Image (cartoon, rainbow, N blue to C red):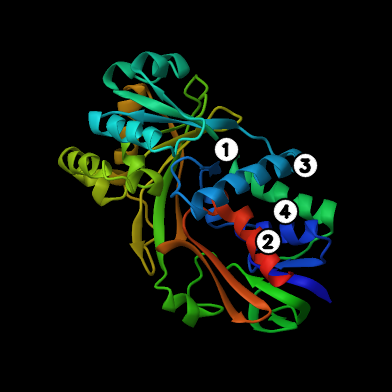
C-alpha cells in the first residue's frame, strides 16, 4: 500500500513525488511511456522568475527555482547557466523595462545601457539595441539530461517506485487500475500533461484546456559562451509581468507593424546554452485540440531571424529540430479535486519547469495536512 500514487512522470509528476518522498511518504509514479518524452524534455529547462505575473505565479517560480538548485546538487544535475539578459531592440521595449524596474517588480535586476549590454555579452550586436535588463533570478538545466537524473535520484535516494510503460485506466481510491494490474494507494495525484481525453476528461474540458504546439531548434556551438539566457522584445509580450503593464501596448503596436508574421505565429526568442556549447533556440506557439505534428521551415526561419537580429548574421548550423506540445488555458495552472483523495493537477501555460516544484508542495500539503 502506497501513501501516494502519482500518475505522470513529467516534471510536474516528479515534483509531487519529490515533495511527498521528502516527507517520508511511500510513493509510486506510474507513466504510460518508458521514459519522459513530452514537454518536460522538449523545453528550454529555463526556470524563469523575472517576468512572471506578480503574485502567485512569481512566488511559485521563485520557490521552484530554489528547489531546483537544491535538487540539482543532490541529483548531479548541472546548472548550465544563471540569469537572463533581456535585450531591448526598440525604444518601446526599453521604456517597458524601465517601467518594470520603477514598478518595483525587478528584484535584484538592473537596467543595461548599450555599453553595459556589450560588456556583459560581447557577441550581442549592441550598436543596434536600445539597451536591456539583466536578471540574476533564473537558472537553466538541460531538460533531456535533468529529467532522467531527477528520476534516478528519486528512486535511489528516496525509494520512489516507478512503474513505466504502464497505463492507468481508472481510479477509485484506494485502488488505481492499470494495464499491469491494480495499485493500492491512499491518495492519488494525476498530472496528465497534454492528454486531454484520458483520465478526468470532463473536468479538463470544463476548464477549456487546449494544446499549444511549439517549434524549437538546436544550433551548433557558436564559438562563445552565453553569460545567461537571452530574450528579446517579443518575449516581453509573452510574460505576464511585462505584458500586464500599460506600456506593453505601445510595444505590441510597433511589433504588429514591423513583425506581424512573428506575432501571428507566436514567435519569440529564447536562447540558452548546453554543456557542449550548443544552443537551444525557440520558439513558436500554435493552438488547437490536436495540432499537426509538422514543423514549418518558415516558422523556423522567423526564429532564426530574431537570433540573427541580436547576434548578427554569423554562420548558424542547425543540428536538430523538433516540435513540442503542452496544455494551454486562460490560467497558468489549476488543481481540481474529483475525489477527496484525488487531485488533478495541470500546468496550462508552458511553465512546468518554472513553477512545478512549488505546485507539488501545495498539492501534497493539501492531501496530507
Residues at marks 3 and 2, CA–CA distance in whole angstroms: 17 Å
Note whether residue 10 is visible: no
Query: Residue 21 vs residue 106: left or right?
Result: right
Residue occupying the point 82% across, 66% down:
26
Residues at marks 4 and 1, CA–CA distance in whole angstroms: 18 Å
Q: Residue 335 at x, y = what percent?
A: 55, 69
The residue that disc 3 covers is 74
Camera-side mark, 1 or 2 = 2
Q: Residue 211 at x, y = what percent?
A: 41, 64
Secondary structure at badge 2 equals: helix
Classify mark 2: residues with Cα within 10 Å, few (<14), some (14-19) or many (20+).
many
Q: Residue 1 at x, y = what percent?
A: 84, 77
Residue occupying the point 60% across, 40% down:
142
Label 2 with label 4: CB-CB less than 8 Å: no
Q: Residue furthest bottom?
A: 172
Which one is earlier in the sequence, the residue at label 2 or at label 4?
2
Secondary structure at badge 3 equals: helix
Q: Residue furthest left?
A: 257
Camera-side mark, 3 or 4 = 3
Seen from the viewer's position, the closer of residues 283 and 90 is: 90
Give the total of numbered labels: 4
The residue that disc 4 covers is 151
Query: Residue 173 vs residue 319: left or right?
Result: right
Classify mark 4: residues with Cα within 10 Å, few (<14), some (14-19) or many (20+).
many
Above-or-below relation of 42 to 133: below
Which one is earlier in the sequence, the residue at label 4 or at label 1?
1
Query: Residue 283 vs residue 221: left or right?
Result: left
Amino acid at each position: 500500500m502506497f501513501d501516494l500514487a502519482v500518475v505522470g512522470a513529467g516534471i510536474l509528476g516528479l515534483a509531487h513525488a519529490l515533495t511527498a518522498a521528502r516527507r517520508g511518504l511511500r510513493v509510486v509514479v506510474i507513466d504510460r511511456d518508458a521514459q519522459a518524452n513530452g514537454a518536460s524534455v522538449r523545453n528550454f529547462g529555463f526556470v524563469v522568475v523575472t517576468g512572471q505575473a506578480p503574485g502567485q505565479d512569481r512566488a511559485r517560480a521563485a520557490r521552484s527555482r530554489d528547489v531546483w538548485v537544491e535538487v540539482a546538487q543532490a541529483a548531479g544535475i548541472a546548472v548550465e547557466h544563471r540569469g537572463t539578459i533581456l535585450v531591448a531592440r526598440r525604444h518601446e521595449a526599453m521604456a517597458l523595462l524601465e517601467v518594470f524596474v520603477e514598478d518595483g517588480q525587478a528584484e535584484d535586476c538592473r537596467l543595461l545601457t548599450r555599453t553595459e549590454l556589450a560588456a556583459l555579452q560581447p557577441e550581442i550586436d549592441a550598436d543596434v539595441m536600445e539597451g536591456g535588463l539583466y536578471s540574476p533570478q533564473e537558472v537553466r538545466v538541460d531538460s533531456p539530461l535533468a529529467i532522467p537524473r531527477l528520476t534516478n535520484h528519486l528512486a535511489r535516494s528516496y525509494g520512489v517506485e516507478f512503474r513505466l510503460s504502464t497505463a492507468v485506466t481508472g481510479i477509485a481510491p484506494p485502488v488505481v487500475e492499470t494495464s499491469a494490474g491494480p495499485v493500492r494507494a491512499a491518495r492519488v495525484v494525476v498530472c496528465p500533461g497534454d492528454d486531454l481525453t484520458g483520465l478526468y476528461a470532463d473536468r479538463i474540458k470544463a476548464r477549456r484546456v487546449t494544446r499549444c504546439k511549439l517549434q524549437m531548434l538546436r544550433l551548433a556551438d557558436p564559438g562563445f559562451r552565453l553569460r545567461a539566457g537571452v530574450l528579446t522584445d517579443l518575449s516581453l509580450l509573452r510574460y505576464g509581468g511585462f505584458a500586464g503593464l500599460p506600456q506593453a501596448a505601445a510595444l505590441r503596436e510597433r511589433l504588429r507593424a514591423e513583425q506581424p508574421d512573428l506575432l501571428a505565429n507566436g514567435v519569440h526568442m529564447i536562447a540558452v546554452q548546453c554543456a557542449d556549447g550548443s544552443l537551444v533556440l525557440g520558439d513558436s506557439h500554435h493552438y488547437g485540440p490536436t495540432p499537426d505534428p509538422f514543423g514549418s521551415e518558415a516558422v523556423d526561419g522567423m526564429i532564426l531571424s530574431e537570433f540573427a537580429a541580436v547576434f548578427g548574421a554569423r554562420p548558424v548550423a542547425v543540428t536538430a529540430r523538433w516540435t513540442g506540445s503542452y496544455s494551454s488555458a486562460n490560467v497558468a495552472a489549476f488543481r481540481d479535486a474529483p475525489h477527496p483523495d484525488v487531485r488533478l493537477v495541470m500546468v496550462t501555460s508552458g511553465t512546468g519547469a518554472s513553477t512545478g516544484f512549488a505546485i507539488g508542495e501545495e498539492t501534497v500539503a493539501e492531501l496530507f495536512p
